[in-house]
Image (cartoon, rainbow, N blue to C red):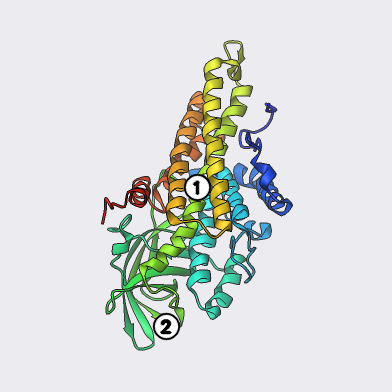
């Protein structure tokens, strides 16, 4: 499989050494290509400046509803109702263009909207999901706290019943979209029963304060927030009736963890494609870098890892289609793909030499952004211990 050496470093090369494309339906292919064209023509050109300025590229974000991708696999309510493979391909392509955009989409479509779709009442679904699919309403997901990241099950944010309302007090940290959301899914512990409950908090309510976390070195053009909840009153109608314990929180997280594996694949694909095209274009010592044995060896090793990541993703999509995707399998895929993506991107950056650190050449941006995926939705260490518990029957953590 040879590649035309002309074109920008961000342009997709269609890297598919094991021909997984043959398993796509025409509908899946059409959605995939529509997103790919949007990424090549709109997302990638805008990403370096937005990343450098730490500004959300609204002109890019606002094009997502027209693509019909906001809402992932949610059926009805103005959502696309994609199958798992299509949802994965969308996540991969968005990450190939811009990890910040992919993260915005994952928070909106995955964490926020799926909380409502899976745990909300019919009235809540009718009220919120169509507006969220149009991006008329932005959502956020407030679980992580300043003192509780990997052990989020120990969350301290409290909720107490007061007549027809609930009163919420606590702190949340690293909340994607938290400063721009109209509604934030806040997870809090009932002071009486100690059960973990979910609430759709109107962010204009007195006592809700969100402050953007500054000076990030990763995912710079999507905003995460520190959130303070001081006596925030939430009516009973805005409590998620299906959220009765932390297990329900985990059900939402299990559906989105596989998305992280797809996003990691997107970042790695961007790095590999850029490195291959650069090696074909760049001449040193009188010939293209691609003609040197050591460069070819490294490109082949990168391709081998990338192909393995593709196969991981294809299999978790099939398992999800069969309603048989266990959280530990999704966790293993996330752990593997983020680890491999970091490796691929480090080699891509090195193959670009000094040009590899320029934002206009994109690779260093992907190299920085993969660090966020490496951490969120459960770190590599935590995923390892969860899978370790599964295969040994022994828990190495509480």
Tell me if 182 is positioned left or right of 70 in this view.
left
Q: CA distance from mark 1 to mark 2?
A: 36 Å
Mark 1 and mark 2 lie on one chain; the one further toward the N terminus is 2
Q: Residue 259: percent from the left, percent from the top?
A: 51, 52
Please tell me which residue is depicted at 53% across the width and 77% down the height of the picture.
124
In the image, 243 versus 200, the foreground residue is 243
Name the secondary structure under disc 2.
helix
Q: Is mark 1 in CB contact (under 8 Å) with mark 2?
A: no
Vertical relation: 148 (above or below) 337: below
Crowdedness near tag 2: few (<14), some (14–19) or many (≥20) residues, C-alpha within 10 Å: some
How many numbered badges does the structure rendering display?
A: 2
In the displayed orientation, state which residue is furthest to the top: 286
Q: Percent x, y for residue 392? A: 32, 48
Q: Which residue is mark 1?
A: 261
Q: Position of residue 379 (x, y in %)?
A: 37, 48
Q: Which is nearer the eye, 17 or 60?
A: 17
Query: Where 124 sits versus 115, above or below?
Result: below
Residue found at x 58% / y 52%: 318
Q: Which residue is denoted by mark 2 in the rendering? A: 236
The secondary element bearing badge 1 is classed as: helix
- Say which quadrant the C terminus sits in: bottom left
Q: In the picture shown, does residue 254 fall above or below 313?
A: below
Determine which quarter of the picture holds residue 286: top right
Badge nearest the viewer, 1 or 2: 1
| Image position of 232 (left or right of 77) | left
Q: Residue 175 at x, y = what percent?
A: 41, 59
């Amino acid at each position: 499989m040879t590649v035309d050496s002309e074109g920008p470093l961000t342009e997709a090369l269609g890297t598919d050494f094991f021909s997984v494309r043959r398993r796509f339906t025409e509908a899946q292919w059409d959605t995939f290509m529509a997103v790919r064209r949007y990424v090549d023509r709109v997302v990638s050109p805008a990403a370096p400046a937005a990343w450098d300025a730490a500004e959300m590229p609204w002109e890019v974000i606002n094009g997502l509803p027209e693509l019909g991708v906001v809402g992932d696999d949610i059926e009805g309510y103005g959502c696309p109702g994609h199958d798992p493979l299509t949802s994965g391909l969308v996540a991969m392509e968005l990450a190939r263009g811009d990890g910040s955009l992919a993260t915005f989409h994952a928070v909106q479509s995955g964490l926020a909207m799926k909380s409502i779709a899976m745990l909300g009442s019919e009235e809540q679904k009718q009220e919120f999901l169509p507006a969220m699919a149009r991006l008329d309403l932005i959502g956020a997901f407030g679980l992580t706290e300043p003192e509780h990241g990997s052990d989020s099950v120990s969350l301290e944010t409290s909720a107490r019943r007061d007549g027809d309302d609930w009163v919420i007090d606590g702190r949340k940290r690293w909340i994607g979209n938290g400063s721009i959301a109209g509604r934030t899914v806040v997870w809090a512990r009932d002071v009486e029963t100690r059960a973990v409950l979910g609430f759709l908090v109107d962010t204009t309510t007195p006592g809700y304060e969100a402050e953007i976390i500054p000076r990030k070195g990763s995912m710079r053009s999507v905003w995460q927030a520190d959130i303070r909840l001081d006596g925030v009153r939430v009516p009973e109608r805005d409590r998620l009736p299906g959220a009765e314990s932390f297990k329900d929180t985990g059900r939402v997280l299990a559906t989105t963890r596989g998305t992280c594996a797809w996003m990691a694949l997107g970042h790695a694909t961007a790095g590999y494609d850029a490195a291959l095209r650069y090696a074909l274009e760049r001449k040193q010592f009188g010939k293209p870098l691609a003609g040197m044995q050591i460069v070819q060896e490294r490109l082949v090793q990168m391709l081998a890892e990338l192909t393995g990541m593709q196969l991981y993703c294809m299999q978790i999509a099939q398992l999800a289609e069969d309603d048989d995707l266990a959280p530990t399998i999704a966790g293993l895929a996330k752990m593997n793909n983020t680890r491999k993506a970091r490796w691929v991107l480090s080699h891509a950056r090195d193959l670009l030499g000094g040009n590899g650190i320029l934002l206009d050449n994109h690779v260093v941006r992907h190299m920085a952004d993969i660090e966020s995926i490496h951490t969120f939705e459960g770190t590599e260490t935590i995923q390892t211990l969860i899978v370790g518990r599964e295969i040994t029957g022994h828990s190495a953590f509480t």
